[in-house]
């Protein structure tokens, strides 16, 4: 199996990185120039690993083509999707390839500065990235690059690109209206709403800003060093390369592992998570909390953007949450909906109010107090929850909950008719604090988080 992103042993010094062939990517980019660098990334077929799978080369050329304005690069290392730990694993294993990718992206799109955004709570990764940036600047690989490291809040929305720009500008993670390629960092207008208090520093025009995920950028130096055809020799025609997958939930040893795109989901669960426990079967798999459920009869789906889309789901950031046949799917729906309700910022009332109502009704059904009308009411809210949405979180609520209702209707009927949950074993929402040595540590404190983002004291 081809792997190149996750070394067997972590690379913890620039010398070790250079000895392993590091720097060849940035040298190739400097040799061929920005336009040919973007062309190489386009031909490689690399797609964004942050969840959406957008073609990276197309994104870069869209930013580079907007001349007469400042441009910026933002690296998204917020990694807030439940069930996902691959960016942190990559930064622990090799922060240098990521920083080299940042340098190449900044050069290719002609950006003034780069911002690397991680959560303040990711102390180990912040330290690794800071060290890598300093070592690479000192060694002359990029002595004149301005790379800022931003330690952001723990909120899920910090990872949403429009909210991330707000955080860089010193504000809370509330998604703005315009996408970063239209209205980037410190852009002058258009007016987005009334602001009291000091106005933010604005200069230069629309300032189109490139936002890319940590794994996306980690691929970049390898593609420049080895060529687009090399990258296309792995994976599938529509999803070339490898993906760093996370497998958590009801598996023997939750972990992160790099697999070739196109590998069947069943094989990924076995190879990365060591499979489900003896005597158990997989009942459902979720890619984060952003995509429709994958059911047991669909486990042979290849892990690729196109194959997941063909079964009506999405590969997302390849963070797979596995439920075995003892799991209650009403409880799964309740907990995922609660996560999205709590993390919704409330700028769009149908999103906050709707996800709250859906969560309340799911909890009622789960505890055996549900009524027949609850299902119809949930479905009605699912139709409205995305009205006027500024960001994709509201869509996630609709996709996840409606897919569980569709795939497991008998479980909802059973709860309502028999006034009890037949599978009372509870699973936490896999918001990961750490994942190492086959052990996942979940954020138990999340249960105390309230819809206004304060924490209830016990
Ligand atoms: C609610 C929400 C949370 C997100 N969280 C993350 C995240 O933690 N990391 C990430 O890379 N992308 C996240 N995204 C996707 C980003 O908005 C953006 O699409 C991505 O960083 C683009 O990078 P890529 O093209 O390299 O995939 C999130 C999106 C939404 C709607
Ligand atoms: S859709 Fe939801 S999470 Fe996104 S900006 Fe609107 S209220 Fe906030």
Image (spheres, rainbow, N blue to C red):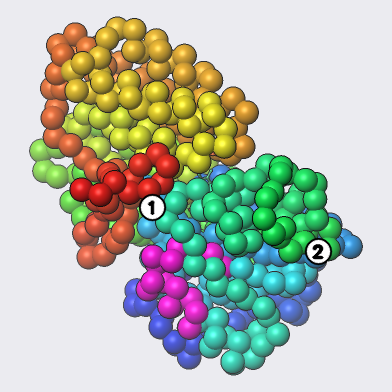
SS under mark 1: loop
In the displayed structure, would residue 96 be above or below residue 324?
A: below
- Residue in front for this viewpoint, 261 or 364: 364
Q: Residue at x 29, y 46 (%)?
A: 456
> Considering only order in the chain, which callout, 1 or 2, is on the residue closer to the N terminus?
1
Q: Where are the magenta residues, as a range?
A: 116-131
Q: Could you say where residue 13 lies in the image, as x and y percent from the top left? A: 44, 87
Alpha carbon of mark 2 to alpha carbon of mark 1: how far? 36 Å
Q: Is residue 50 visible?
A: no
Q: Which image quadrant for residue 363? A: top left
Q: Which residue is mark 2?
A: 203
**Position above or below: 231 against 196:** below
Q: Are marks 2 and 1 in contact (CB under 8 Å)?
A: no
Most foreground residue, 388 or 402: 388
Q: Residue at x 64, y 61 (%)?
A: 169
* 9 with respect to 230 (left or right): left
> Which residue position holds label 1?
84
- Note whether ligand 1 is within 8 Å of mark 1: yes
Q: Is residue 271 left or right of residue 424?
A: right
């Amino acid at each position: 199996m081809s792997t190149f992103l996750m070394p067997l042993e972590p690379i913890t010094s620039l010398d070790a990185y250079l000895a392993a062939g590091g720097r060849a990517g940035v040298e190739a980019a400097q040799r061929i120039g920005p336009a040919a660098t973007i062309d190489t990334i386009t031909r490689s077929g690399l797609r964004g690993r942050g969840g959406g799978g957008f073609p990276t080369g197309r994104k870069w050329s869209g930013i580079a083509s907007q001349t007469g304005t400042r441009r910026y690069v933002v690296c998204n290392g917020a990694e807030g999707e439940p069930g996902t730990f691959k960016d942190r694993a990559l930064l622990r294993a090799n922060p240098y390839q990521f920083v080299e990718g940042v340098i190449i992206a900044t050069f290719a799109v002609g950006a003034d500065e780069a911002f690397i955004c991680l959560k303040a709570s990711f102390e180990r990764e912040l330290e690794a990235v800071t060290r890598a940036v300093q070592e690479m600047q000192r060694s002359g690989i990029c002595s004149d690059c301005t790379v800022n490291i931003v330690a952001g809040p723990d909120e899920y929305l910090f990872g949403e690109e429009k909210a991330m720009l707000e955080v860089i500008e010193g504000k809370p993670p509330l998604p703005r209206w315009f996408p970063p390629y239209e209205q980037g960092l410190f852009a002058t207008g258009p007016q987005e709403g009334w602001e009291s208090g000091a106005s933010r520093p604005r200069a230069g025009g629309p300032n189109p800003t490139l936002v890319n995920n940590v794994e996306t950028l980690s691929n970049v130096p390898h593609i420049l060093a080895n060529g687009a055809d090399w990258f296309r020799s792995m994976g599938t025609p529509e999803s070339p390369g490898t993906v760093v997958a996370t497998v958590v939930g009801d598996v023997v040893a939750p972990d992160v592992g790099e697999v070739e795109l196109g590998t069947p989901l069943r094989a990924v669960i076995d190879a990365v998570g060591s499979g489900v426990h003896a005597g158990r079967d997989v009942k459902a798999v979720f890619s984060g909390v952003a995509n429709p459920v994958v059911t047991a009869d669909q486990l042979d789906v290849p892990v690729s953007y196109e194959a997941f889309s063909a079964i009506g789901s999405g590969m997302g950031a390849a963070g797979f949450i596995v439920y075995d046949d003892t799991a209650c799917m009403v409880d799964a729906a309740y907990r995922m909906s609660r996560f999205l309700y709590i993390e919704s910022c409330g700028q769009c009332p149908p999103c906050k109010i709707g996800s709250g109502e859906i969560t309340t009704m799911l909890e009622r059904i789960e505890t055996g107090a549900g009524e027949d009308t609850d299902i119809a009411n949930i479905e009605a809210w699912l139709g409205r929850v995305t009205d006027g949405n500024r960001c994709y979180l509201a869509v996630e609520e609709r996709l996840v909950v409606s897919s569980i209702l569709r795939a497991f209707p008998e479980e909802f009927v059973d709860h309502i008719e028999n006034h009890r949950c037949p599978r009372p074993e509870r699973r936490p929402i896999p918001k990961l604090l750490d994942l190492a040595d086959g052990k996942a540590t979940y954020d138990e404190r999340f249960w105390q988080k309230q819809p206004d983002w304060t924490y209830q004291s016990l």
